[in-house]
Amino acid sequence: MDLPVMPPVKPMLAKSVAKIPPGMQYEAKWDGFRAIVHRDGDEVEIGSRTGKSLTRYFPELVAALKENLPDRCVVDGEIVIVRGGRLDFDRLTERIHPAASRVKMLAETNPASFVAFDLLALGDEALLDTPLADRRSALAQALSTAQPPVHLAPATTDPALAQEWFEQFEGAGLDGVIAKPLHLPYRPDARLMFKIKHERTADVVVAGFRFHKSGPIVGSLLLGLYDDHGSLQHVGVCAAFPMKRRAELVEELEPLRMPDPEGHPWASWAEESAHEDARLPGAQSRWTGKKDLSWVALRPERVVEVAYDHMEGHRFRHTAQFRRWRPDRAPESCTYAQLEEAVGYDLAEVFGPPPAAR
């Protein structure tokens, strides 16, 4: 491979803002695996956000990228899996598997798509210093005949349309809007773009915590919600506390600690089979590897209000943010019924018709 921008490349990033800023290019915020694709003829390399290779996990995309990308290029985009008209992140994570036979089977049963939204190089020309507006124009031309599963990400300079996308596209599994200054060069690993994400609040039960990697202070709180059967399901974690506050939380939660987890709703967390029928903390995965996922059981008696962006199935998609304790709420009242659901929206409407049909 001999390209003007060589792998690995870390993608340009975005920082959070509360509102959609004016005077920029706007795109949907995809919920998948960020990926930088290098293509030089028959050679294709798919790099992750951290620079590690994803190529072996998505053989069906390698073939599709050869068919739809220019012969020599470097493209920034997102790998997604679509199921039932919306993005399915859980299906996507299943693709990171050590067994080639398993990868092959999943590539056939749950094929991935690639959504392109930036162009870093074309032919012999590096475009890192080229303004975004010109890169976008070149990308649109380069992908003018691309067919699914390779897509050109929709983009607009109309903030009113961006606001519509923000409100509608969540129903298809997207999680906000990205705003990019039109003059912006491409700067790997720099937070120069802006992301506007949904934020909601929920009252959840604190049923345990994990210690911080630095010592005997709280690393994260384990959160739960009661389902329709009265079972407490693990829905995610709350973290990002100042160090002083982490130490204070250990003392605050001490009266709730259970010396023996027997009787706790998640007492069977260490048994692999228990994770098949319920959401429990501590399940090993290809992402956690040998990471210590043990936790301290607490009597599920305290309620906390947290902020979250959206749900993935029955759990918070990202780490929730602490807002306040809710001593006025009974734990049993913290159910899934309080959660706001996005109005459904077919992902096909986001992509629009393929080029041949336009």
Image: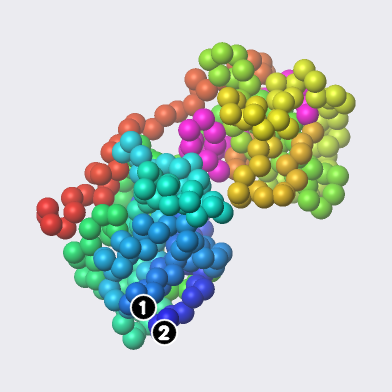
Magenta part, dominant SS: strand
In the shown orientation, is residue 133 left or right of residue 38? left
Q: Which residues are magenta?
A: 297-318
Q: Which mark is residue 40?
A: 1
Labels 1 and 2 touching (C-beta < 8 A): yes
Label 2 sits on what residue type?
Asp
Give the quadrant of residue 37. bottom left
Could you tell me which residue is drawn at 86 percent across and 34 percent down? 251
Please rate how many residues cluster around mark 1, counting C-alpha atoms within 10 Å: few if below 14, some from 14 to 19, many from 20. Answer: some
- SS of the residue at dot 2? loop
Front residue of 312/26: it is 312
In the shown orientation, is residue 75 left or right of residue 275? left
Question: From mark 1 to mark 2, how far is it between C-alphas?
Answer: 7 Å
User: If you read the primary sequence from the N terminus, does the residue marked by circle 1 or circle 2 appear first?
Assistant: 2
Q: Which mark is residue 198?
A: none
Q: Is residue 302 magenta?
A: yes
Give the quadrant of residue 110. top left
Q: Which residue is mark 2?
A: 2
Picture layout, residue 341 above or below residue 319: above
Q: x and y percent of residue 151 in the render? A: 28, 57
Front residue of 202/225: it is 225
Front residue of 45/237: it is 45
Q: x and y percent of residue 73 in the render? A: 34, 76
Give the quadrant of residue 264. top right
Label 1 sits on what residue type?
Asp
Could you tell me which residue is drawn at 22 percent across and 58 percent down? 147
